[in-house]
Amino acid sequence: MAIGFMNSIQWTVFLLSVVALVAGKVGFIEKDASGTILDISGQPYYAPLNPILTVHPSKSSGVGRPPAGFIPVTSIRAPYSPITKSFLEAQIRTYANIDDVWTDRFLESLFISYDGQTTGFLDEAAEKWLQSSNISHVYLTSNIRLPSIVSPPISQITAGPPAGPYFTTPSESSGLNIHNMYRLRKDEYASFLFGAIPNPSGGDGWIQTNITLDESGAQYIPVPSRVALLTKSLPLSGTRFALKDIFDAKGLPTGAGSLAYARVYPAPYATAPAIERLLDLGATIIGKTRTSQFAHGAQPWEFEDIPYSWNPRADGHLTASASSSGSACAIAGYDWLEFTVGSDTRGSVRKPAAFVGAYGIRPSHGSLDLTGVLPLSEEMDTAGFFARDPRLFAALGARWYEESPVRIKRQTIRFPKMLFYPTEHFPVENPAAQALYDGFVTALEKHLKITMVPMNFTTALLEHLPNGDFNNFQKQSNLLAEYRSWISVGQPLIEAHEKLFNATPTFDPRPRRMFALGATYTEDEFVEAVRLRHAFRDSVNANLLKADIKSCSESLFMYDAGTGGRPSYRVEEFNHIEGAVQAILTGHTEDATPSDYFHFVATMAGLPEITIPLGQVRYYSHISREWEMLPVTVQLVAHRGCDEMLLKLTDKLAVAGTSHDVCPPQLSTIHPKAQSPLQGLRLPFTYRPTATEDLAFRALKEHNEPLDRGVQLLPAFDLCRDILGLQKAVEGWDDVAVNMV
C-alpha cells in the first residue's frame, strides 16, 4: 500500500457502520485512542481526544444540565457591550458565509464571551432572540450579567474558547471539555499522502492522519474551521495549504515519494525554514501531497511506490506533469485549500500549473532558505507554490519571498516595454488555444503598454549557450540534477538502507536511471557543469533579459509550458490516440525541438517565471466519449530578482479596474460579492452555477468536427478571492469569454 509506512492515526472505517445515537443528534462513526469520528447531517467530522479547554459551569439560570455526549457548539466573542441581537445574528451569518466547516448544526449550544474591561450584558432583543431559538444551552463568561430567562438554560463560565465551532463532552470533574473539530474532506483525486493536525499532546509540530471511511480507500483530510484560524491577526490567517512531501514539517515523515526513504529516516524534529515563514504569516498546514520519487521529473506511468494523483480537469485521465503534480491536483480540485507548496528545479511547479490550469511560480534561484527540503540539485532548486486566485497568488508571493536575498528592492514605476514572442514556438497546434495567446498579447499592449517583439528565441539563445549547442546545454542541466541527487540522496540512502535492513532498496524507474547516470559522473564534470550554468546565468541576465531601472526587467519572455491545447494522458498508450501528445519533461524526446525545453532557460539562468491561466478550449475525448475542456496557460519569464514585478503584473491584470481580470477557469464555482463583519475581513463562499451552453459548441458536437476546430465556451470562473483582506470586494462581475484579459 502506498502509505503503508504510516503509524499514527489510522482508521479503516466504513460508513455502513454508522450508528445514529438519537434522531437529530450527532452520529458516532468510530473512536480511536487519538480521537473520534462523528457524523453530522451526513458529513464526517473529527474531534481529537485531548480537549483544548475544560470549563466548569457554575451559576445558572433556567433549568436543565449541560447536555451529555458529543455536542456541536459555536463560540462567539463580543468586543463591546451591550451584546445585541443584530451582533449575534451578524456573527452567525459571517460564520455561514466564510466557513466551509461550520454549519447551523453547531448552534445546538452557544458560548458567548465578552472581551471588554467592564461588565457586559445582553440587550432585551438578544435575550428574546435566545428564547425563540432552538439552542439547547448557552454559556456566558462570568463578566456578562446573567439574564433572567428560563429557556434556554444559561450557565456561567470563567473563560470561553476562541471564536469558531467546537465539540463539547462531559469531563470527569463534572466540567465540560471543549474539543477542536475538523471537517473530513475526501481526497478523491489522491493528491494527498496524508493529512495533518497539530500535535494534540501540546507543543509545536503535527501528527499525520490516514482516515478512510468507505470501500474506495480514499483518504479523508481533517480540515479546520476558517473562523478559528482567523483568531490570529496575521497576513495569511484563514488560509489552508498542503505541502509537497520533500519539505520537512516537525513530526510529519518526509518520504519523498519513496517507501525506502521513509523507512530509513525518522520524522524530522524541525520544520523547514521556508515553511516556518508561511506559518509565521498565519497559514495553516493540513497535510502533505504526493510527489514523484525524490522530485525527479517522472511520467505518471513511472510512479510505483506512491501512485500518481488524478488531474481533476477534463476527462479525469490527463497528466498533471512533473514532480509537484500532487500539489497541483490538490489546488485544482479542492476549494478548501487556498494554496499548495511545490518545488521547481526543472519545471516541477510551472508545468503542473500549466496542465491543471492554476497560477504557479518558480522564484528566482536563491529566494528562500531550502534547509529541510530534500535536494534534487542545489544549483537549480527553488520553492514555489500554486493558487487559483490571482490576487492571493500575488500577495502570497510578495509576502513569502519578501526577505529574498536576490530580490531587487528598487521600486518599479512601470512594467517592461518588450515581450519576446518566440516565432518558432507559436502558433500552437490548436487554433482556439492560439486565439487565447493572441488575446493575451493584445491585452498586455493595450492595458500595460508591453509591446510584442517577434523573434526566434532559440537563435537568440545560441550565443549564451555552452558551445552554442542546445543539446549540450540540456545535458549539462541534467548532469547537475543527476550528480547531486545521487551524491546527496541516492548513495547515502542505499548505504543506510543496507546497514539497517541488510537489503538494497528498490526505486521507481526514473530515479533508478538517474542514480545510475549520476554515479558515472566525476566531481570535475559536475564542477564544469556548474561553471557553464553560471556563465549562462550571467550572460542571459546581462544581455538578453536585461535589468531596467524603471521596470526591473527590460523585457519579458513568453511561451507555453503545456501542450498547445492538446490533451496529454496519464497512461502512456493513450498518448497515441489521434489528437493527443505526450508531455515533455526533462529527458530527450523524439521529434522534440529546443523550444519544447524553454523551461530550462529560467532553470539554468536562475530567473523568476510565473504561470498564468488564460482560459480553456474544447477537445473531443476518446476516453469519456465527450467533448471536454482543457486549460490553456502562458509562461512569463523576467530578469533575475524581478519576482515582485511579475507578481504585481498578475495582480494588475486581475484588479486594474478593467472588465477583463485574469481569473482561472475553476471547477464550476463562482463567488458572489460578499462582505464579512468579522474584523473587516472578507473570505470566499461558493455556489454552483448553472452550466452555460455555447451554441457553436453544440453545432460542433453534432457535426463531430475534428479536434483542432475546438471552440471557446463561456467557462465558470473563480472570482478573485479577497482572502487576505487586501482589496475591496469585487463588484459587478459579469460572465466574460475565455480570453480573460
Image (spheres, helix red, strand yellow):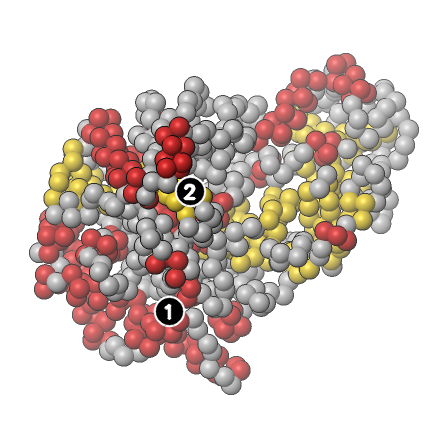
**Could you tell me the amino acid type at mark 1?**
Arg
Q: Where is residue 293 drawn, in percent x and y?
A: 43, 66
Q: Is residue 334 above or below residue 50?
A: above
Mark 1 secondary-structure assignment? helix
Rendered position, 274 above or below 162: below
Q: In the image, which is nearer the foreground, mark 2 or mark 1?
A: 2
> Is residue 425 visible from the viewing direction of this image?
yes
Measured as percent of width and height from the top left, residue 149 is found at 85, 20
> Residue 50, how many percent across, how many down?
72, 51
How far apart are the alpha carbons under marks 2 and 1? 31 Å
Question: Quick one: SS at disc 2?
Answer: strand
Residue type of the residue flagged with mark 2:
Glu
Q: Does residue 562 appear in the picture of this structure?
A: no
Q: Residue at x 33, y 31 (%)?
A: 740
Q: Find disc 1 in the rendering and name its residue.
A: 510
**Given the current orientation, which residue lies at the most extreme right position?**
63
Left or right: where does residue 298 sit relative to residue 453? Answer: right
- Sequence order check, earlier mark of 2 and 1: 1
